[in-house]
Image (cartoon, helix red, strand yellow):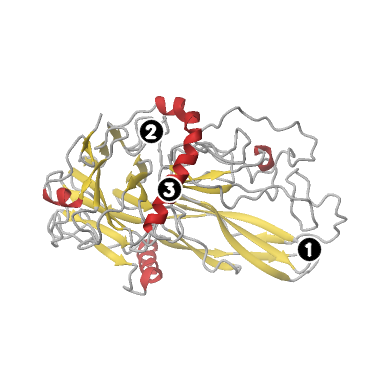
Amino acid sequence: MNAQARACRAREAKMRRALWVAVCIGWVAGCDGGGTVTAGDAGPSASGAGGASGGIDAAVSGLFDMGRRDGPQDGGAGPLPIDNDGGASGGPDSGRPPRACAPEEACETPFDEDCDGLVDEGCGCRQAEKACYTGDPRDLDAAGACRAGVQSCQLEFYGPCEGQVLPTAEICNGLDDDCDGVTDEGTGCANGAPEALCPPDQSGSPLALYPLEGGYADPDGDPMARATWTLRSAPAGATGRPMPADALRSEFFADLQGEYLLELEVEDTQGQIGRCTTRVIAETSDDGLRIELVWNAGASGDDSDVDLHLKRGANGAWHDDADDGDDCHWRNCSVCSNEGVGGGEAGCRAYLSDLNRDPNRSVPPQVTWTPPLGEDDPRLDLDDVQGQGPENINVRRPSPGTYRVGVHYWDDDGFGDSTVTLRIFCGDALARAYDPTTLRAAGRNGDDNTEFWEVADVTWRADGTCAVTDLNPAGCPRICDNGTATAVGCPSDQSRGRACR
């Protein structure tokens, strides 16, 4: 699909969804933005620059934790209860009361409150991705086959709910297919289900490979016919998947900071199925300052190139690509590129993992901001040129001072407008998360017409703490053409040449 067709489809979708925008008017009316957020105190003021804040602590949260009831992840709206051991409140024939439907949809929840088969229709995006389920929420109370799906932000609105599993008629397979809390009832099933054996939870740093050593046991001695690893939940925008997915022994690359839930499913030769889950907690980093960028989460056919920038001081020059230049970006600061260097993306990920998993080694800085080159200098771990990211810039021990964060839409490569999200970490703590923001497809190959977004200033203090100052008034991201950004920087209180109100 070419850029013009994509734009037409986006406008058509926007017009359809406009029928439901009134649902969220009350929610949007209470939103604010801007201001300064201090690491460890990212409360309601930690809103996104591209949309409403709505009082969410971190607007770009991870996917809902689909395996526990123990509270929100990364400031999100909360987990989906589908892996607990209680409650047979299940499917449509369980005798439970009819599902209650609301007169209108509630934004930023995983469920279809008005029972029209859609989740969060007409609601402006607050996350790159989020969990969703169009069926009865009680289906997920039992440890059955029902699963929530994922919906991604497509420019301004959430797309369809993809990958969900709704109740089906019960069959003999070792699963609670109708999600009523009882397995294989009424099927005359005599063969026992196999047991999937998962490794213990693992913890460590992001940008590292984690081994997945699965196992299989069967009470009837039936041989294993199939093993499948699936990523069940992850930080929004994560692109890592178990590789290979169809073997007991696999591995997983955690490409964003956060928690991951992985599921192993095994099937025996009689069609019986067993499942287990394990977690990868990639939340420990030796870096003082870490900035993560993702774009077009979950999109297909995305080859767009969006670049992350970190500038030394607010008055430095964007695109200063000298070895000691003001701007850390792909030209002078990347440790690795997924474009053919060191075996492409797979080679880059293996190289970075080796460095991050070895306590005696570290990823080397790339630009000399404070001679000699050392831990107070920045690096771009991976320059992603093939769509979606992530890209991340890190400084292990930042010198006290102010650093400015920028995002450049280098080239859409036929994809059209892109939706970008960004998170800033100070130490291991999320200091600031931004709502999905649209960058328009304008110009090519980083020319003066392409768009540049000046996002935030990060002030690093002598005591190792930081404060993030948002450069964007609510609903008015500081976006300008790249020519202006390079020459003088994007004008304050303007967005694409128009004054912010």
- The residue positioned 50% from the left and 29% from the top of the image is 23
Q: Where does residue 413 sit, x and y in percent of width and height?
A: 33, 62
- Quadrant assignment for the C terminus: top left
Q: Amino acid at mark 3?
A: Ala
Q: Where does residue 241 sit, x and y in percent of width and height?
A: 50, 61
Is 319 drawn above or below residue 87 in the view shown? below
Is 2 drawn above or below residue 68 in the view shown? below
In this rendering, does residue 24 appear at all?
A: yes
Q: Which one is in front, 490 or 222?
A: 490
- The residue positioned 23% from the left and 42% from the top of the image is 496
Is 229 drawn above or below residue 313 in the view shown? below
Q: Are marks 1 and 3 in contact (CB under 8 Å)?
A: no
Q: CA distance from mark 1 to mark 2?
A: 54 Å
Q: Closer to the camera: disc 1 or disc 2? A: 2
Mark 2 is surrounded, within 10 Å at the Cα level, by few (under 14), some (14 to 19) or many (20 or more) other residues, namely: many
In this rendering, does residue 283 appear at all?
A: no
Q: Where does residue 431 sit, x and y in percent of width and height?
A: 33, 40
- The residue positioned 47% from the left and 45% from the top of the image is 13
SS label for mark 2: loop
Q: Which one is in front, 439 or 317?
A: 439
Q: Which residue is mark 3?
A: 10
SS label for mark 3: helix
Q: Which residue is mark 1?
A: 219
Disc with the residue nearer the chain's start (1 vs 2): 2
Mark 1 is surrounded, within 10 Å at the Cα level, by few (under 14), some (14 to 19) or many (20 or more) other residues, namely: few
Q: Amino acid at mark 2?
A: Ala
Q: Quadrant of residue 205?
A: bottom left
Residue 52: which numbered mark, if any?
A: 2
- Quadrant assignment for the N terminus: bottom left
Disc with the residue nearer the chain's start (1 vs 3): 3
Query: Relative to 64, is 194 on the left or the right?
Result: right
Q: Amino acid at mark 1?
A: Pro
